[in-house]
Image (cartoon, rainbow, N blue to C red):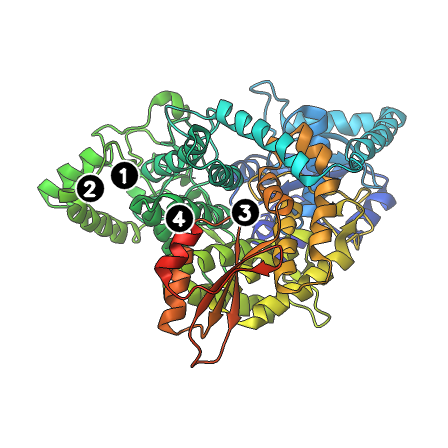
Amino acid sequence: MGNRLAGASSPYLQLHAGNPVDWYAWGEEAFARARELDRPIFLSIGYYTCHWCHVMERESFSDAAVAELLNRDFVSIKVDREERPDVDRLYMTYVQATTGGGGWPMSVFLTPDLKPFHGGTYYPPGDRHGLPGFPRLLATIAAAWREQRPRLLASAEEVDRFLRQATAPAPAAAGESLAALREAVWPRLFGELSAGFDRSAAGFGGAPKFPRPVAHRFLLRYAHQHRNTPEGEAATTMVTSTLRAMAQGGIHDALGGGLHRYSVDANWRVPHFEKMLYDQAQLVTSCVEAWQCTHAPELADLGRSTCDFVLREMTSAGGGFYSAQDADSPIPPQHQVPGGPSEGEGAYYLWDQAEIEALLPTEAAALFCRVYGVRPHGNVPQQLDPQQEFAGRNILYQTEDIASADAAALAAARQTLYQARLQRPRPPTDTKVLTAWNGLMISALAQAAAVWEEPRYLAAAQAATNFLAGERANSDGALWRTAGVSGFVEDYALLIQGLLDLYEADWHPRWREWARALQQQQERLFAAPDGAYFSSGEDPHLFLRLREDYDGAEPSPNSVSVSNLLRLDLLYENEGWRERAERLLAGFAARLREAPQALPQMAGALAAAAAPAKRLMITGAAQRADTQALLRAARARFLPGYWIVPAPAPEGQAASAYLCEDYTCRMPITAPEVLAAALE
């Protein structure tokens, strides 16, 4: 027996279509039903590749007794956070403010007018680990709604007032220059990141350890500003050592490429196995920029293998990029335990030593097992595997550097094992094509294509952009986030960034023109006095409109917009784009001063806004050898102070490069070696 989610486009909602819970999708039908029945709303928010979302679905939402409680006393709404990040951000703000933490699945109880009065995340089916069992929680809240409703309603109104006050931006500092703001923010942010850096295992903080590409972007810009100083070298090292540690750790899929969401331990060895598109995209960009700083081949290898993974496993037939691969997958029959689960986290990626020895020649197997830490009884310490999900099995992580003499043999072994792994039941893929995350991947591929001269990556970026132009753009020029869901500010900002990066890579003016049109739409739909609201406000049911002010797993669209506006100003002069960037930064000045770690990507963009406008203008025919030689000289270097501005010229005209500052250009340069010296 199905419920209302059977026809949903979201794979996450479809996972719950067979539950006995009488689920509603977010919308007026559900809200009207809550008002009609005078019941509280149970709002459950998650996403397709969320491990604990799967656990709660199996334990509670598939249970007839739990469903009876929900259907009797509540109106239950299920939301895919990736489709409706506005709903997710609003109620996550509440949960974090009232509990001190957050995560998914998110479980929030609302009045019929959608104001929250109780919230949390995962709840077990019975009392354990200090958490109430979900059935007991439902009974308690239902009783309180019947017997103590005035108290709950008063709490909801108090929460409303608190959230409005807490999310109101601080007033901009009058008269403060951006240069002064940079001098206040940059040393503090560098000091905080340096203090939190793990000097033994790399990365920031302890376990669990997450990638944080937004911090990489700031540190590499800090290093460039402080090059040839101990601080600059330290900033570069923090990024490059983190990328190397990730490349060697279990968080990196050594066989198929791509990076998992985070590491359970501090040493990057035991991952949470889901793979998110936004992680792949941003870490490719980190690899590109770090390679430009160092020319270390292993950084290019990590970036290329990640691009190759996305092209091979996360690209739709139409060219758009899928959202994620699940952490859980079916357990191969030979590893299933009688009476145990049929699927488990990481099942697709785990190996027995005997399996490897059966697939590889003896010497190759011994070499592979030594280099990748494979042990006869498994290599995951019990303290990192309390549920014994990985007992006796191995996660592949590099325990020693690969000698050049062994590189070819190990590459052949990896390919053999990868082909064997393809015969296993594969992790499910969330096939949603989200505009924002596709924008990030278009940026990454365009940058990788330009810097590493890889036509496949450029073709993939172009195909994805054409897909979005055909499937995610309305007739009035507005964007869809995914089919049937209007775009949010991050969809605009991240696609604009992707279009500008693609324009730098292939010189096609349509990308530049579309970026300009989308920026105009973004300002029309999302403009706030001090930046941009996350949503357009078209959903009247959300009681609060938030401004995104945190560079987290994804960058804040306001941070991305600073760079977008500065770049558009170089392409379209006298249109006020730079002034808009300066006003945006002024609106975030207090946030940057008080909590610079919240906005490292914006802090990085602050330097470009505080300095005179700089561009490297290259004239010539895009495909001529002399034009490509000049581009190669520029792209081999990390140039955060300059943006490359293409200036197409007729086929017969020789290529030239112009270094321009504050709208004044130096004499033309025609020799690549002269340009390289000037850029140094």
Vertical side of 508 occupied by 210: above or below: above
- What residue is pinned by disc 1? 351
Mark earlier in primary sequence (1, 4):
4
Between the residue at mark 1 and the residue at mark 3, the CA separation in whole angstroms equals 25 Å
Mark nearer the viewer, 3 or 4 = 4
- What residue is pinned by disc 3? 48
- What residue is pinned by disc 4? 292
Q: As shown in the figure, which amino acid type bears the numbered disc 1?
A: Trp
Mark earlier in primary sequence (1, 3):
3
Mark nearer the viewer, 1 or 4 = 4
Between the residue at mark 2 and the residue at mark 1, the CA separation in whole angstroms equals 7 Å
**Residues at marks 3 and 4 touching, judged by CB atoms closer than 8 Å:** no
Question: What x and y, as percent, mark residue 580?
Answer: 73, 52
Between the residue at mark 1 and the residue at mark 4, the CA separation in whole angstroms equals 36 Å
- The residue drawn where x is 57% and y is 49% is 12
Between the residue at mark 3 and the residue at mark 2, the CA separation in whole angstroms equals 31 Å
- The residue drawn where x is 62% and y is 37% is 599
Q: As shown in the figure, which amino acid type bears the numbered disc 4?
A: Gln
- The residue drawn where x is 72% and y is 26% is 98
Vertical side of 129 occupied by 66: above or below: below
Between the residue at mark 2 and the residue at mark 4, the CA separation in whole angstroms equals 37 Å
Q: Is 283 left, or right, of 361 in this rendering? A: right
Q: As shown in the figure, which amino acid type bears the numbered disc 2?
A: Ile
Q: Residues within 10 Å of mark 4 (few under 14, many from 20)?
A: many
Mark earlier in primary sequence (2, 1):
1
Question: What x and y, as percent, mark residue 36?
Answer: 87, 46
- What residue is pinned by disc 2? 356
Question: What x and y, as percent, mark residue 552?
Answer: 58, 38
Label 4 element class: helix
Mark nearer the viewer, 2 or 4 = 4
Mark earlier in primary sequence (2, 4):
4
